[in-house]
Amino acid sequence: MLASTGMKSWLAYKTLRKLNTRSVSSPSSQDSLIASSTLSKVTTPPSVAAATGAAYTLSKLTNTPKLQRFLLKSTLSASAAGLLNAGLKRLIGRKRPRAETGPEFKGPALKDKFNAMPSGHASAVTAVAGSIPRSSGPLLLASAAGLAATAVIGKSRTKRDAHHLSDVLVGSCLGFGVAYAVSKLEKPVENEVKRLTETH
C-alpha cells in the first residue's frame, strides 16, 4: 500500500509539472475552466468531504460494499486532511503568491494572505485519489482519473495565484499520507467494532 501511495504521489507530481511547464502564451477555454472560481469552490476540503459523504449515504441504499468502503474512507480522509491542512496553514503562515505585501513566511497567522502552505484543495482531492483501492480494470482507470484530478487542481491553484507549486506538492503529500493512514486503521477498527458487537 505504501509503495502504491508513493507511486501515485510521484505520478501526480510528474503530471502537475507537465501542466505547469506548458506554454501560457495564449489562454484557452480549458485554462479559463481550470482557473474558474466554480472549480475552486467545489474542491475545498469541506466541499469534497460533503460530496463524498453524500455519495456514501446514497450508496447505503445499494448493495455495493466495496463502493461504500471506498466512499467512507474518502470522506474520512478528506475530512482529516482538511483539518490537518487548516492547522498547518495557520502555523506555517506562508504568503500567497497574489499577496503583494508582507514577509514570505510570517509564522502563525490567521489572515488568508498568509495561508498558502499547504494547499487545502490539493490535500482534499489527493485524499480521495489515495483512497481508491489498488486493483486492475475499472479501479485502475479510477485511480488514473484521481491522479489527473490532483494535477488539474494543482494547476488551478497555481494559476489563480493562490499557491506556489511547492504548496500544492506538500498538500498532495498530506492528502496521500492521510489516505494511507486511514486505510491502515481500517482493519483494526473493523475488528474492534466486530468484537464489541459480538460481546453485546
Image (tube, rainbow, N blue to C red):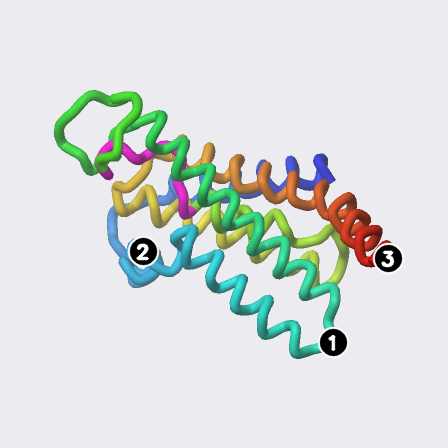
First reached walking from the N terminus: tag 1 or tag 3: 1
Residue at the extreme front: 200
Tag nearer the camera, 1 or 3:
3
> Residue at position x 69%, y 45% from top?
183
First reached walking from the N terminus: tag 1 or tag 2: 2
Q: Relative to 140, is 197 on the left or the right?
A: right
Mark 1 closeness class: few <14, some 14–19, many ≥20 residues within 10 Å: few
Classify mark 1: helix, strand or loop: loop
The residue tagged 3 is 198
Mark 3 closeness class: few <14, some 14–19, many ≥20 residues within 10 Å: few
Q: Position of residue 79 (x, y in %)?
A: 50, 49
Where residue 66 sits, quadrant-wise, is: bottom right
Judge whether residue 183 is colored magenta.
no
Give the CA separation, mark 1 to mark 3: 23 Å
First reached walking from the N terminus: tag 2 or tag 3: 2
Q: Position of residue 29 (x, y in %)?
A: 30, 63
Give the CA separation, mark 2 to mark 3: 55 Å
> Residue at position x 72%, y 47% from top?
186
- Residue 192, compared with residue 139, is above or below; it is above
Judge whether residue 115 is colored magenta.
yes
Q: Which mark is residue 31?
A: 2
Q: Which residues are magenta?
A: 112-121
> Residue at position x 73%, y 51% from top?
134
The residue tagged 1 is 63
Three-letter code for the amino acid on which mark 3 is drawn: Glu
Three-letter code for the amino acid on which mark 1 is drawn: Asn
